[in-house]
Amino acid sequence: MIRKWWQDAIIYQLYLRSFKDSNNDGIGDFQGVISKLDYLSDLGVNAVWISPHYESPMDDNGYDISDFYKVSKDYGTIEDVKELIEKAHKLNIKIIFDLVLNHTSDEMDWFVAAKDPNHKEHEKYHDYYIWQPPKYNEQGDRIMPTQWRSWFGGPVWEYNEPTNEYYLHIFSKKMPDLNWRNEDMKADLKKMTKWWIDLGVDGFRVDASNHIEKNWDFPEGHPGYENFSSIPKHHEYLEEMGKEVFIPNDVFTMGESGGASQEEAIKYCGFNNEEFDMLIHFGHCWADGDWDNKITPGKWAKGKIDVKHIKYSFDKWFKMLKGEGWNIIYWHNHDQPRILSHYGNDSEYYNESGKMLAYTLYFMPGTPIVYQGEEIGMTNVDYKELNDFRDVEVFTEYKNFMNQGATHEVAMQALRDRSRDNARSPFQWDSSVNGGFSQVTPWMNTVKNYKEINLEKQKNDPKSLFNTYKSIFKLRKEESINNGDITFIDIDNEDSYTYINETDKSKFLVVANFRNVKIALSLDINIENYKNIYYNYNIRELTNYIELKPYEALVYKLDK
Ligand code: NOJ
Ligand code: CA
């Protein structure tokens, strides 16, 4: 198999709205990205995945697209996109766009025609979406077709009076789901994708890719997620996109799917498959839920971090795809809290835990995706008021928490700990007003710690998180760490994170304490000739028995 560029890449996930505002309207934009390309190149990344940039009413920050062919005026123009692609390519940086194929905005002209029986194109577009007639209860009242729940906390059905039907939306009600059983709809999506490829984009991250098929029997279910997640037929659609659009045009793709069996994983991203090149999966992401909590249920309640679960998830994926496909490694994206606040400790052990998380992730094999701001140790938000938040999900869930008996304070704490907005606050460039993101009040507030935590402060400090990331990224390339073979040494240990990643030239041994208390560890390996190359307290010689301080982490290298 010919080696592909993305196997050796380090990808940066860039949240466009919050990266850099160039024209001082408080919103990040393409010219802002262009002005920081040198920064990305200096950090050592060679591909950038940019969150949706299309025209949108911004109900879900651009995942609700109203015109696939237009750039949102918030972000700039098509000329800016062309300029970005050209300038990024000069720095050997590839541009990956977000491709949203599961739904559109309700303001998209397709849906405007679909919902209105008097619209001249109603007939064509009605079937682009998913409709069901109402049901009636014993009293004769109209009720929803099913009790399925949307990912954002409310029902999946919204009533449309003019047609006396409900439409399905597995995300917000402003995001009606597309009907992939409609051939014209699919043809339109393919045409649109090709249009962006022709503009010069190098790849796509395909949003919600395991949700595109639904259970068309519409059985009862609550929450009913199984009726719109990973239904086998979605592979047929993805393969069709691969065969007809992605593969012939040689664009890179990564899909998004919560989980997968080995058979499915290989369908998604096996070397010989025809769906995607890589898959973003989430097994390691919410390893600290308190699933029994009734007031702020699901991901919203914080429990103890299950370190074993994190290791098992990565290990499972490495084993499933070994020799058969290529893995992605990442800590979090724009849908989860900041890693340093989530799995680390952003108060007492800021530096120690920040580095521990960098060592544990970035010495594993696979292609890394670093999330904007992670490289400077940005933290969760510090918002005090509900209206400091922006995410559509926050507002539905806040109401749910209050109905379930939460106090305002408990609900607010859940939002500060777990909401998606945590990862979306503006990038902290320097200690000037708004962290150097914008001269005017940003679309969402900068976290107040920007005076202490910012790029400018870390740039010239060799011990900073930023320089740690940068140096590891450099080493990753020199040593082809993406290509290694990993063995966890302590997979059943509940507190530590220890593995060897063997590359062609070297062995990298990472020894880490994931807890905020001391732990002791016995390493049953031959420790000879390992040299300590990274440490977050003091340099240490390797011994078989080690006592580790809170979050202490060490990286050793053995030349083969
Ligand atoms: C997954 C995206 O990552 C998330 O941010 C978005 O809300 C949903 N898909 C819907 O597009
Ligand atoms: Ca702007």
Image (cartoon, rainbow, N blue to C red):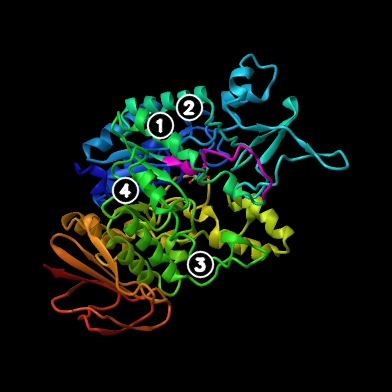
Q: Which residue is mark 4?
A: 11
Image marks 2 and 3: residues in contact by CB distance under 8 Å: no
Q: CA distance from mark 4 to mark 3?
A: 26 Å
Mark 4 residue type: Ile
The picture places residue 317, in percent across and down from the top left corner, at 36, 57
Q: Residue at x 27, y 80 (%)?
A: 523
Q: CA distance from mark 2 to mark 4?
A: 29 Å
Image marks 4 and 3: residues in contact by CB distance under 8 Å: no
Give the extent of the magenta segment: 206-221
Q: Residue at x 18, y 61 (%)?
A: 503
- The reply to whether residue 353 is visible in this rendering is yes
Q: Please tell me whether mark 3 or mark 1 is closer to you in this view.
A: 1
Image marks 2 and 4: residues in contact by CB distance under 8 Å: no
Mark 2 residue type: Lys
Mark 3 nearby-residue class (10 Å; few <14, some 14–19, many ≥20): many
The picture places residue 195, in percent across and down from the top left corner, at 38, 24
The picture places residue 122, in percent across and down from the top left corner, at 63, 19
Image marks 4 and 1: residues in contact by CB distance under 8 Å: no
* Most frequent secondary structure within the magenta stretch: loop
Quadrant position of residue 528: bottom left
Relative to the observer, which residue lies in front, 294 or 265?
Answer: 265
